[in-house]
C-alpha cells in the first residue's frame, strides 16, 4: 500500500504514531476506545491516576516485562503471555491473582490491527485467569527504540491462610513433581523466528496456572515450593530451588516428559530440552507423604493432565541438581549460562 | 521410525553395555574425534558405564575450539570496520579472541548478526546493498558445502557485497598430524558422523591401514555411541583394524558426492593453523581464485595485530588429547562458561564445556 493511503475507513490511523503516546487527544482516544472498553471494569473506567480498592489478608505482589519476538506465535501472543506470566508468578506463591496493571511500550508504526488483536487477547486471558486489569499506561517510542511492542504487567493476589510456599522450603525426602512436557513454548516461538522458520505442529504451552495451583493446594496445603520453569527451563528452576533450599535435587531423565517434536527440534538446533523455556508448566516440591495426592490433583486439572513425579530432594551436595540418565549413569544438571546458541555442525 | 527416542532406549542400551563388558579384555584407549560425540558421552554418562579396560579421550573435533587466535582476531577486526555486517553462526559470538569477543563488540555497536543458514546471510547482503556482509566460514567438511553453495549463489545473482572469511578445516589431515606426533597412543577412533556424511568412510582408511587403528563412524545418540564402542572393542579383541560404519542411517562409504563437488568447485585445500596443533598441510579450505572477489581475505585489508594466548590455558593440549580439562588449573576456577578463558569452555561442543556442564570432576 506504500504511504499513499493514510487513513482507515473508521477515521483512525492504521498505524500507531508517536502522537498516540503524547498524552493528547490521540492518546485519550486510544485509551478509551482500545483499552477501557476491552477491559471493562469500574476500577479502570474511573481513569484516575491509581486504581483504588479495599483489601485485607496476606498479599503477593509481582511484576514482569514481556519482550518476546515474534509477538504472535503458535498457541499464543505477547498479550496472553503478559497476563499468564504475571498470574503464574502470583500463583507460584500460592496466591489467588486479583488485579493486574498493564503497560505498553509501542514502537511507532505498529499496525493498529495488531494492537487490537493483542488487546483482545489480553482481555480473554485476564478473563480466563479471573483477574482484572485495573490500571495501565501507554508509551510510543521512535522506530528502532523497541521491537514492535513491549508489555509490562504487575499483579497482586491474596494468599490463603495456612499456605507457606517459598523456594527455600524444600527439605530432604520431598518429592518433585512436574505438571507436563517441557520445551513446547520455547520451540514454538523459535520456529517462528525470522531466519529460523521451520514447520512444526507444536504450540506454546502458555497457560494460566492459578486453577491448577488452587486444586493442588486443596489436595495438600503443605506444598513446600512451586515455580514455573520459564526462561532457563526446568534445569535452571531446579537449580534455583536447590540453592535456595540448600538441598540437592535428584531427577530421572526417563521420567521427564518431552514431546517428540521438541526432541527433534532440539537435536536440530543443538539445544537441551532441560533449558528450553516453558510458559504454562510448574514444578512442585511437596512433602513425601503428600506426593501421590498432589500428583492426582494435578492430573485432574486441564493444565496438569500430563503431570509426573520426576525426582526427590536429598541432603548431600546442597545446591546441586543431579540426573540419572537413561543409561543409568548420573550427571550434574547445571544452570543455563547466557542464551542457548545454535551450534555450527 | 522417528530416529530419536529409538536410539535412546534404555533396554537396548543395557544389552549393549553388558556385551561391551563381556567382550572387552584388552585395555584400550579410544578417541572420539567429534565434539558432538563428546557431548553425548557426557550427557548420558557413558564414561561411567564402560568397563575399566576402556579409556575415552576427547579429540579436536570442535570447529570453534581449533580456530587459532590469529584467525579469530581477523574475524574480530573485520567486525570493527563500520561498513561491515558480520553474519555468523551463534557459537562464534562468545568466543574470546586475543583481546575481545564478537559478543562484546556487538554490545559496543558493531553490526554482528547471528544467522542459522548461509542463505540468511545472502539475504542480509541483498537488503543492505551499501554495506558489506562478511560470513564467518568456520566449520569442518559438514558446513563447507553449504557455504560453497552460498558463494555460487552470490555469483549467480551478482550479489557483490557478500564475502566469506574461509577458516574451514578438514578432519582427516589433522588426525594424521596427531597420530604422527606420537603424543597419544590410540587403539580406536570414533569417526565423526556428520563429517563422514559428507566425505564418506573411505578417507579414514589410511588410519586403519597405515596406523593399525580400528575406526568406526558413529551417530550422535547414546545407542550409536555404545554400538560404535562395541564394534571397536570387537576389532581390538580380534586384532583387526578396519573402517566400519555404525551410523548407517546417515553415512554411505562414498559420502555425499554432490556436496563434495560443490565444496571443491569453490574451495581448494590449503595449509591451516590449528590451535594447539600448529600448521597442518592441506587441512584448510581456501576460496579458489575465480571466486576471489567474494573472499573476505582479499576484499578487506585488516591488521589484527599479534595474537595473544592466555597464560595457563591448556586448550591446545586438550585438543590433542594429551591433557584433560581436569589437568588445567584454570578449569572451573578462572575459566567457566560464564567467564571463559579458552574456546573449549565456550563452544557447546568444547571438551571443557562438556566436562564442566555435565559435572565431570566437580
Image (cartoon, helix red, strand yellow):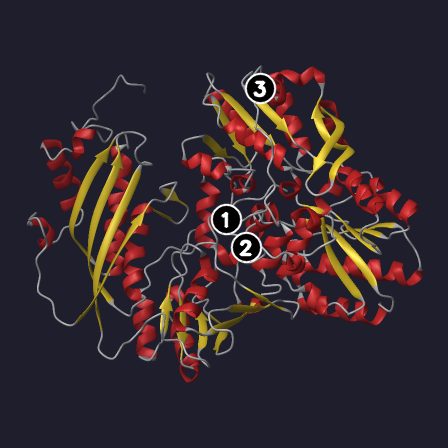
Local packing at callout 2 (Cα closer than 10 Å; few below 14, some 14-19, many 20+) is some
Name the residue furthest bottom. A289
Chain under disc 1: A
Give residue B20's position: percent from left, percent from top: 80, 67
Foreground disc of the pair 3, 1: 3
x, y percentage for residue A240? 41, 64
Q: Do the residues labelled 1 and 2 touch (CB within 8 Å)?
A: yes
Where residue A317 appears, as percent x and y from the top left, is 51, 74
Side (left or right) of B50 relative to A290: right
In this rendering, do the residues under marks 2 and 3 share a single chain?
A: no
Q: Distance between the residues labelled 2 and 3?
A: 40 Å
Quadrant position of residue B13: bottom right
The numbered mark at residue A272 is 2
Q: Say which of B172 and A41 sits in front.
A: B172
Q: Quadrant of the C terminus of chain A?
A: top right
Which of the labelled discs sits on residue A340, or is there none?
A: 1
Give the Cα separation between the discs numbered 1 and 2.
9 Å
Please give the residue where the numbered disc 3 appears in the rendered image.
B301
C-alpha gap between disc 3 and disc 1? 33 Å
Amino acid at each position: 500500500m506504500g504511504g499513499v493511503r493514510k487513513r482507515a475507513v473508521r477515521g483512525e490511523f492504521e498505524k500507531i504514531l508517536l502522537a498516540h503516546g503524547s498524552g493528547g487527544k490521540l492518546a485519550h482516544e486510544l485509551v478509551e476506545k482500545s483499552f477501557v472498553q476491552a477491559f471493562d471494569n469500574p476500577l479502570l473506567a474511573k481513569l484516575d491516576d491509581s486504581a483504588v480498592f479495599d483489601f485485607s489478608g496476606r498479599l503477593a505482589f509481582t511484576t514482569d516485562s514481556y519482550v518476546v519476538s515474534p509477538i504472535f506465535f503458535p498457541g499464543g501472543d505477547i498479550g496472553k503471555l503478559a497476563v499468564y506470566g504475571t498470574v503464574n508468578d502470583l500463583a507460584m506463591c500460592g496466591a489467588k491473582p486479583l488485579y493486574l496493571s498493564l503497560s505498553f511500550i509501542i514502537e511507532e508504526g505498529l499496525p493498529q490491527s495488531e494492537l487490537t488483536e493483542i488487546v483482545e487477547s489480553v482481555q480473554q486471558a485476564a478473563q480466563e485467569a479471573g483477574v482484572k486489569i485495573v490500571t495501565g499506561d501507554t508509551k510510543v517510542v521512535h522506530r528502532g527504540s523497541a521491537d514492535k511492542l513491549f508489555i509490562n504487567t504487575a499483579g497482586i493476589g491474596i494468599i490463603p491462610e495456612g499456605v507457606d510456599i517459598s523456594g527455600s522450603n524444600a527439605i530432604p525426602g520431598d518429592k518433585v513433581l512436574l505438571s507436563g512436557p517441557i520445551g513446547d513454548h520455547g520451540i514454538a516461538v523459535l520456529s517462528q523466528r525470522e531466519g529460523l522458520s521451520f514447520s512444526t505442529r507444536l504450540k506454546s504451552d502458555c497457560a494460566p496456572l492459578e486453577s491448577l495451583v488452587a486444586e493442588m493446594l486443596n489436595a495438600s496445603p503443605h506444598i513446600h515450593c512451586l515455580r514455573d520453569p520459564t526462561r532457563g527451563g526446568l534445569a535452571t528452576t531446579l537449580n534455583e530451588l536447590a540453592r535456595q533450599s540448600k538441598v540437592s535435587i535428584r531427577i530421572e531423565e526417563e521420567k521427564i516428559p518431552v514431546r517428540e517434536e521438541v526432541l527433534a527440534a532440539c537435536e536440530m538446533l543443538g539445544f537441551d530440552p532441560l533449558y528450553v523455556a516453558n510458559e504454562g508448566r510448574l514444578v512442585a516440591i511437596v512433602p513425601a507423604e503428600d506426593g501421590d495426592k498432589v500428583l492426582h490433583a494435578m492430573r485432574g486439572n486441564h493444565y496438569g493432565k500430563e503431570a509426573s513425579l520426576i525426582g526427590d530432594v536429598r541432603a548431600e551436595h546442597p545446591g546441586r541438581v543431579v540426573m540419572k540418565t537413561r543409561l543409568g549413569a548420573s550427571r550434574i544438571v547445571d544452570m543455563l549460562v547466557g542464551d542457548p546458541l545454535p551450534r555450527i555442525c | 521410525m522417528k530416529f530419536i527416542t529409538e536410539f535412546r532406549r534404555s533396554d537396548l542400551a543395557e544389552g549393549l553395555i553388558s556385551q561391551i563388558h563381556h567382550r572387552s579384555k584388552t585395555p584400550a584407549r579410544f578417541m572420539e574425534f567429534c565434539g558432538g560425540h563428546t557431548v553425548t558421552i557426557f550427557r548420558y554418562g557413558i564414561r561411567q558405564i564402560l568397563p575399566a579396560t576402556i579409556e575415552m579421550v576427547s579429540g579436536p573435533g570442535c570447529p570453534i575450539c581449533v580456530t587459532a587466535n590469529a584467525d579469530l582476531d581477523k574475524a574480530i577486526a573485520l567486525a570493527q570496520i563500520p561498513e561491515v555486517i558480520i553474519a555468523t553462526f551463534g557459537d562464534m559470538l562468545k568466543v574470546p579472541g586475543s583481546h575481545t569477543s564478537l559478543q562484546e563488540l556487538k554490545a559496543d555497536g558493531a553490526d554482528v548478526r547471528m544467522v542459522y543458514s548461509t542463505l540468511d546471510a545472502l539475504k542480509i547482503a541483498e537488503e543492505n546493498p551499501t554495506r558489506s556482509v562478511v560470513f564467518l566460514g568456520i566449520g569442518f567438511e559438514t558446513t563447507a558445502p553449504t557455504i560453497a553453495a552460498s558463494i555460487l549463489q552470490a555469483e549467480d545473482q551478482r550479489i557483490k557485497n557478500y564475502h566469506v572469511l574461509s577458516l574451514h578445516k578438514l578432519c582427516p589431515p589433522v588426525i594424521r598430524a596427531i597420530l604422527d606426533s606420537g603424543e597419544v597412543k590410540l587403539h580406536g577412533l570414533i569417526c565423526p558422523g556428520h563429517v563422514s556424511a559428507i566425505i564418506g568412510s573411505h578417507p579414514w582408511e589410511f588410519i586403519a591401514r597405515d596406523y593399525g587403528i580400528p575406526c568406526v563412524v558413529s551417530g550422535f545418540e547414546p545407542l550409536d555411541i555404545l554400538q560404535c564402542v562395541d564394534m571397536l572393542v570387537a576389532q581390538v579383541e580380534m586384532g583387526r583394524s578396519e573402517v566400519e560404519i555404525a551410523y548407517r542411517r546417515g553415512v554411505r562409504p562414498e559420502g555425499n558426492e554432490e556436496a563434495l563437488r560443490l565444496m571443491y568447485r569453490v574451495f581448494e585445500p590449503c595449509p591451516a593453523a590449528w590451535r594447539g596443533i600448529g600448521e597442518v598441510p592441506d587441512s584448510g579450505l581456501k576460496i579458489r581464485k575465480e571466486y576471489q572477489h567474494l573472499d573476505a581475505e582479499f576484499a578487506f585489508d585488516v591488521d589484527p595485530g599479534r595474537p595473544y594466548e592466555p597464560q595457563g590455558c591448556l586448550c591446545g593440549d586438550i585438543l590433542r588429547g594429551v591433557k584433560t580439562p581436569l589437568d588445567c588449573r584454570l578449569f572451573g576456577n578462572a575459566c567457566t562458561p560464564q567467564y571463559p578463558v579458552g574456546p573449549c569452555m565456550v563452544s557447546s561442543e568444547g571438551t571443557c564445556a562438556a566436562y564442566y556442564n555435565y559435572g565431570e570432576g566437580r
